[in-house]
Amino acid sequence: MKRLNVILLLSAVTVALALVMSCKETGAKRLEKMCGEWVSTGSKPPFTLWEEDGNYRVTVLHRNYKGGEEAETYLVRETEGVLFIETGFAVMMEYDREKDRIRLSPGGEYRRKSDEPEKK
């Protein structure tokens, strides 16, 4: 009887873990929701998150030494459930779905460009 109880308990734990793991949102699903144009809530350069052939990329507009803008594109990858932008060193990227904000570490917080008030 004890053996049956142990087997039932292990089965229940296995099913519960499977359900929790299946409910976890994948990096690709998170990235799909994050696609678009983003502007810094501070003074960092804006970026665009987009998908091409199943790979997600970030294009950042930087000011060059002449005062013009230059675009640089980086690959986004997921490692153990954490999203990173590969810029030569890893920039961690977190998404707050409720606030629709992206936080880069380092880099600060970003909001969607469409959230900006219209200039008249």
Image (cartoon, helix red, strand yellow):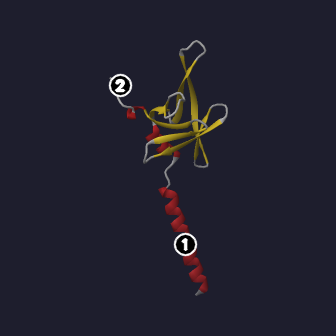
Q: Is residue 97 left or right of residue 71?
A: left
x and y percentages locating residue 25 in the rendered image:
49, 51
In the rendered image, the residue lying farthest to the bottom is 1
Distance between the Cα atoms at labels 2 and 1? Answer: 60 Å
Q: Which residue is mark 1?
A: 11
Mark 2 vs mark 1: give the one in front: 2
Q: Who is closer to the viewer here, 113 or 81?
A: 113
Residue drawn 61% across the image and 49% down it: 80
Amino acid bearing label 2: Lys
Which circle marks residue 94 in the picture?
Answer: none
When the figure is inspected, residue 51 is found, relative to residue 3, above or below; the finding is above
Q: Which residue is mark 2?
A: 119
Q: Secondary structure at mark 2?
A: loop
Packing grade of label 1 (10 A; few <14, some 14-19, many >=20) is: few
When the figure is inspected, residue 43 is found, relative to residue 34, above or below; the finding is above
x and y percentages locating residue 34 in the rendered image:
46, 39
Q: Quadrant of the C terminus?
A: top left
Disc on the earlier residue, 2 or 1: 1
Packing grade of label 2 (10 A; few <14, some 14-19, many >=20) is: few
